[in-house]
């Protein structure tokens, strides 16, 4: 396969130039100046006017398999990811049963291998996600877990958290944390402020996030753990991460932003109801701006979707009863282009770094770069083309972005030199 005339952007090597790429036996065999590769067969992709980037990497994804496959399963989730330009994903452990044992871990890994997507998974930090007893992290790491998380449930026991950080630090793998203190929350998924007042409920205050980030930043600095603060939502949280990263011990601190947190505020929860209910909730404009600033200065080094499918029936329940979360794999790249790159807030190279190079590096995945000898895992997209969000490949459709017109259209997703998605 030859990919010609594309703007090749690779943050890992600093490359940003029109180039041709030769793919042989699933790997990148040669990268050269555009027009230099002779075309000898019909297996050519003309990427004129398009960006050729390393395949996107999402390190915060729920495929609901096993246990909740009416919402999504590994097969449908993989197809949604590929349609969004993702070539690698890291799944969360809050399935049923949870990924706290070898059997469930092996099930997820083996089923992932039957798809065209590179599917990795975290294991749980605590047994049954109960926050009381740590799993055998060494055993689960040996069986293929790439990191550890109780995502969906905060870990409140500080001593257990310290022990977990020490254990994962020894393995040199990330521990990813959902930071919301439930004792401060009356009704989750809706910001305490204008949105909670609109619905006449208590909501989730910003302090719920701030207090746990503050605790865990200190623990991470003391233990040297590779810490990933998931889906950050408050300006104070961003500042705590910034402060920790500036500490001499802070080289292993990471933070995620979701596309919904850098594009929307609590007004979207008022407008869209349960379709914009998520944990942590959409906050205020000052928080959104702080997240964008965090992306600009590298405080937030990862964009992750927190792809969280739910059924239509579940999302049609009352605001206090419907589950939190939205799907995000198919809209993430376009939201980044529309809300950040197109507005001059972030360069295309910085966006790709946050959506591919940086998350791959945190998990030490063989992904996130375009280099000779590396696997040909690529996304080819037209940044200036527009599309309207109308339907989804995902089994679920819980998104506040339905009906929106966005810029950035994925034309090809390539894994191991094979076209696995084509527009």
Image (cartoon, rainbow, N blue to C red):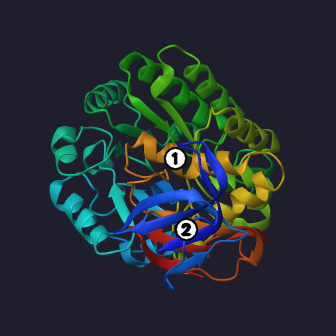
In which quadrant of the rendered view does residue 345 lie?
top right
The span from disc 2 to disc 1 (Cα, nearest Å) is 26 Å
> On the image, numbered disc 2 is attached to which residue?
37
Along the line of sight, the residue nearer the viewer: 47 or 215: 47
Residue 39 in picture, x, y percent from top left: 54, 77
Say above or below: 118 vs 223. below
Drawn side of residue 399 relative to residue 339, left or right: left
Residue at the (70%, 71%) spot, across then down = 48
Work out which residue is located at the far right of the displayed protein and give it: 343
Q: Is residue 249 left or right of residue 402?
A: left
User: Which residue is pictured at 57% across the width and 77% down the height?
Assistant: 45
Query: What residue would you read off at disc 1?
Result: 357
Label 1 environment density (alpha carbons within 10 Å; few <14, some 14–19, many ≥20): many
Element at label 2: loop
Viewer can see residue 223: yes
Asked where in the image residue 189 lies, by quadrant, the reply is bottom right
Please say if the residues under marks 2 and 1 sit with CB atoms less than 8 Å apart. Answer: no
Q: Is residue 218 left or right of residue 74?
A: right
Q: Choose between 183 and 383: the one closer to the eye.
A: 383
Write down the quadrant of residue 234 in the picture.
Answer: top right
Q: Name the residue located 39 percent from the left edge and 54 percent from the top edge.
A: 374
Q: Is residue 274 left or right of residue 28?
A: right
The residue that appears at 52% across and 31% down in the rendered structure is 212
Residue in the foreground of this view, choosing between 110 and 269: 110
């Amino acid at each position: 396969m030859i990919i010609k005339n594309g703007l090749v952007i690779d943050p890992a090597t600093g490359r940003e130039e029109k180039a041709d790429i030769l793919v042989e036996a699933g790997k990148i065999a040669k990268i050269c100046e555009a027009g230099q590769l002779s075309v000898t067969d019909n297996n050519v992709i003309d990427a004129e006017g398009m960006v050729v980037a390393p395949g996107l990497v999402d390190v915060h994804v729920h495929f609901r398999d096993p246990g909740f496959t009416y919402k999504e399963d590994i097969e449908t989730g993989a197809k949604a990811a590929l349609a969004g330009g993702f070539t690698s994903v890291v799944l969360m452990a809050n399935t049923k049963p949870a990924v706290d044992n070898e059997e469930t871990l092996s099930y997820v890994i083996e089923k992932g291998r039957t798809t065209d997507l590179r599917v990795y998974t975290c294991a749980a930090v605590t047994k049954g996600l109960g926050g009381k007893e740590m799993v055998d992290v060494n055993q689960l790491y040996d069986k293929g877990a790439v990191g550890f998380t109780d995502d969906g449930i905060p870990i409140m026991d500080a001593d257990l958290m310290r022990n977990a950080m020490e254990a994962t630090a020894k393995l040199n793998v990330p521990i990813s944390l959902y930071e919301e203190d439930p004792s401060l929350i009356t009704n989750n998924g809706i910001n305490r402020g204008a949105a909670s007042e609109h619905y006449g409920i208590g909501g989730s205050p910003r302090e719920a996030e701030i207090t746990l980030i503050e605790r865990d930043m200190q623990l991470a600095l003391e233990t040297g753990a590779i810490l990933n603060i998931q889906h950050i939502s408050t300006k104070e949280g961003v500042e705590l991460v910034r402060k920790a990263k500036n500490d001499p011990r802070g080289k292993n601190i990471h933070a995620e932003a979701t596309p919904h947190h850098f594009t929307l505020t609590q007004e979207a929860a008022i407008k869209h109801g349960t379709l914009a209910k998520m944990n942590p909730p959409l906050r205020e404009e000052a928080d959104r701006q702080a997240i964008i600033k965090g992306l600009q200065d590298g405080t937030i080094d990862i964009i992750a979707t927190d792809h969280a499918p739910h059924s239509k029936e579940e999302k049609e329940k009352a605001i206090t009863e419907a589950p939190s979360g939205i799907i995000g794999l198919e809209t993430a790249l376009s939201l980044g282009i529309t809300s950040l790159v197109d507005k001059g807030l972030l360069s295309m190279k910085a966006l790709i770094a946050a959506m591919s190079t940086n998350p791959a590096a945190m998990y030490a995945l063989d992904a996130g770069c375009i280099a000779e000898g590396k696997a040909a895992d690529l996304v080819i997209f037209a940044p200036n083309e527009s599309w309207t969000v109308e339907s989804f490949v995902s089994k679920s459709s819980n998104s506040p972005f339905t009906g929106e017109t966005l810029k950035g259209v994925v034309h090809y997703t390539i894994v191991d030199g094979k076209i696995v998605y084509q527009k």
